[in-house]
């Protein structure tokens, strides 16, 4: 099989992920696939997937989405960064493979229990791969502790010598620390985006729900999450306006994947009497950072308490004003009513508030991130980031 045919198979597998298990679609879209005979099966470094061409050629089409989602799990669940200090990487790879494969099998059981086709079939025989049911319900760290002890004791870890279903590369010691931090933060934001896709579907296996919950209430600094969230919303998109023409003969209109200049971004600031002055100053800084580094087509800056007091429209190269008029009660509806009249609709809305106010009755249909300095309070839609530190 030549590289062109392999790439076609990969593209079809990516589309199956998009339609059958959309939770993984944002992660799959972030990992381009290359073929490398030096890799035993498949592996990822968080930036792409390297796949052994001979092993790839032997896999049925139905198994390819399983491999793609397996590699995405390694990234979204932080396996590239969660390894214990001075880790035994062979044992850590095996431990995380057990955890991911068991989770995907659990997911399949949930879907098949609802009468659907198995979304994650594995190559046969399944016993050749790290998927031992004795580790069900355990964290990766717990599994690692068992496997590492077995290897150190000379008994050999269960699963040692089996083909790794999907390894991942050790961090590059020569890379600057901030590079790894940015990659980790970006994958945290990808998990946040996947959590939004899965919201209300009720199909996530229990082993994955804790990661989704952590994504919804993350522990990373709010400004890092804000930047990554904006990058996720405004860069790589499945675009139905520019379909993948190579699938035209199938009779389906399928989305293409491409990069484009960031569309309009809206920032709304709650200027009621309860606003936190220090947070307001930081928020203004983040608006400027978005304008300078992401260079959206425009940045709409709205100030609202019970009603809108001021709207400013900025383009890259301009300076965000520090003036924030207001001081009354809090209603969020005016901002959403104003945005509803905008054409085109914004790429995303970021709202700084204490979450104490009246919300719109319906989800607006575009991504919303609420940034709050309060430790409590929830929003009926979108995602909430609680301020934890200053830039």
Image (cartoon, grey):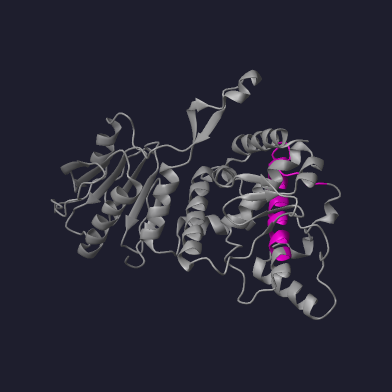
Q: Quadrant of residue 121?
A: top right
x then y, percent, for residue 133:
78, 60
x then y, percent, for residue 221:
39, 64
x then y, percent, for residue 148:
74, 75
Q: Depth check: 261 or 387 in front?
A: 261
Please give left or right for residue 31 compared with residue 2 in the image.
Answer: left
Which portion, as a residue range, is magenta?
94-123
Please give left or right for residue 9 compared with residue 54 in the image.
Answer: left
Most extreme residue toward the bottom is: 153
Q: Depth check: 263 or 34 in front?
A: 34
Residue 97 forms part of the magenta stretch: yes
Name the residue at 52% across, 55% down: 187
Please give left or right for residue 362 compared with residue 278 in the image.
Answer: right
Name the residue at 34% across, 37% down: 346
Quarter placement of the C terminus: bottom left
Q: Quadrant of residue 82?
A: bottom right
Q: Is residue 139 visible?
A: no
Q: Is residue 357 visible?
A: yes
Q: Is residue 78 above or below residue 191?
A: below
Q: Depth check: 10 or 17 in front?
A: 10
Name the residue at 68% across, 56% down: 100
x then y, percent, for residue 147:
76, 72
Q: Quadrant of residue 206?
A: bottom right
Residue 9 forms part of the magenta stretch: no
Q: Is residue 379 above or below residue 119?
A: below
Q: Depth check: 251 or 111 in front?
A: 251
């Amino acid at each position: 099989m030549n590289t062109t045919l392999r790439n076609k198979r990969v593209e079809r597998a990516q589309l199956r992920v998009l339609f059958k298990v959309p939770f993984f679609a944002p992660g799959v879209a972030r990992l381009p696939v290359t073929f490398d005979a030096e890799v035993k099966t498949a592996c990822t470094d968080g930036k792409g997937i390297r796949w052994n061409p001979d092993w790839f050629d032997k896999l049925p089409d139905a198994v390819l989405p399983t491999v793609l989602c397996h590699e995405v799990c390694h990234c979204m669940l932080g396996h590239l960064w969660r390894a214990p200090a001075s880790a035994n990487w062979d044992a850590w790879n095996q431990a995380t493979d057990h955890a991911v494969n068991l989770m995907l099998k659990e997911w399949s059981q949930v879907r098949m229990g609802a009468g659907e086709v198995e979304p994650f079939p594995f190559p046969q025989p399944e016993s050749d791969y790290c998927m031992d049911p004795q580790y069900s319900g355990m964290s990766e760290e717990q599994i690692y502790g068992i496997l590492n002890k077995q290897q150190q004791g000379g008994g050999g870890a269960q699963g040692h010598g089996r083909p790794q279903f999907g390894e991942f590369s050790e961090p590059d010691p020569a890379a600057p620390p901030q590079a790894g931090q940015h990659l980790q933060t970006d994958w945290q934001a990808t998990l946040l985006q996947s959590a939004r896709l899965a919201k209300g579907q009720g199909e996530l296996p229990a082993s994955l729900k804790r990661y989704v919950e952590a994504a919804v209430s993350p522990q990373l600094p709010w400004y890092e999450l804000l930047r990554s969230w904006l990058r996720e919303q405004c860069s790589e998109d499945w675009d139905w306006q520019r379909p993948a023409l190579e699938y035209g003969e199938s009779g389906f209109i399928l989305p293409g994947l491409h990069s484009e200049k960031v569309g309009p971004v809206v920032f709304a600031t709650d200027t009621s009497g309860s606003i936190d002055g220090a947070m307001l100053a930081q928020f203004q800084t983040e608006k400027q950072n978005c304008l300078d580094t992401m260079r959206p087509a425009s940045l709409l800056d709205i100030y609202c308490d019970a009603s809108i007091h001021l709207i400013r429209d900025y383009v890259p190269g301009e300076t965000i004003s520090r003036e924030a008029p207001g001081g009354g009660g809090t209603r969020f509806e005016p901002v959403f009513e104003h945005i509803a009249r905008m054409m085109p609709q914004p790429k995303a809305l970021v709202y700084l508030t204490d979450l104490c106010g009246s919300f719109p009755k319906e989800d607006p249909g575009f991504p919303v991130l609420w940034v709050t300095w309060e430790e409590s309070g929830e929003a009926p839609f979108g995602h909430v980031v609680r301020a934890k530190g200053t830039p």
